[in-house]
Image (cartoon, rainbow, N blue to C red):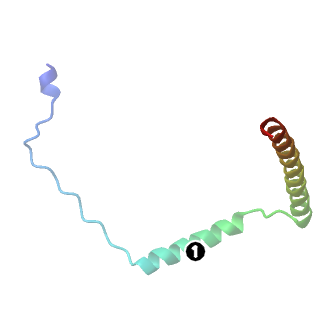
Amino acid sequence: MALSKIKDSSAPKKKAAPKERKNPLTVVSQYVRDVRNEFRKVIWPGRAEITAATIVVLSALVFFMLFMGVFDFIFAKTITAFLG
């Protein structure tokens, strides 16, 4: 019974239709048009939102820079004290 479900591999296989080759310039120009259309759909942030996000990023940068600097200084002094 299970043997009846096995496909006959000796049957001739159909060949796939050859792919239609497209002009590369047409493909690129269509891509650029699609990108422009998608950019038109984007809701861009306003000046106030950009300024607020920039302040948050710069504040976090300064905080972590000081945090890492303090711990680096402490570890350097500790290792120097132990190794002399």
Instruction: Give the residue at the far top of this rendering.
Output: 1
- Provide residue 58's location: percent of width, then percent of height: 87, 57
**Displayed quadrant of residue 75:** top right
Secondary structure, mark 1, is helix
Q: Residue at x 31, y 70 (%)?
A: 20
- Vertical relation: 15 (above or below) 40: above
- Vertical relation: 3 (above or below) 15: above
Would residue 20 appear left or right of 77 to someone viewing this image? left
- Provide residue 11's location: percent of width, then percent of height: 9, 44
- Provide residue 21's location: percent of width, then percent of height: 33, 72
Instruction: Give the residue at the far bottom of this rendering.
Output: 25
Residue receiving disc 1:
33
Would residue 7 appear left or right of 44 to someone viewing this image? left
Would residue 52 appear left or right of 43 to someone viewing this image? right
- Vertical relation: 28 (above or below) 77: below
**Displayed quadrant of residue 22:** bottom left
Q: Residue at x 11, y 40 (%)?
A: 9
**Near-viewer residue (83 or 53):** 83
Would residue 23 appear left or right of 57 to someone viewing this image? left
Q: Residue at x 51, y 74 (%)?
A: 30
Quarter of the image containing the N terminus?
top left
The three-letter code of the residue at mark 1 reads Arg
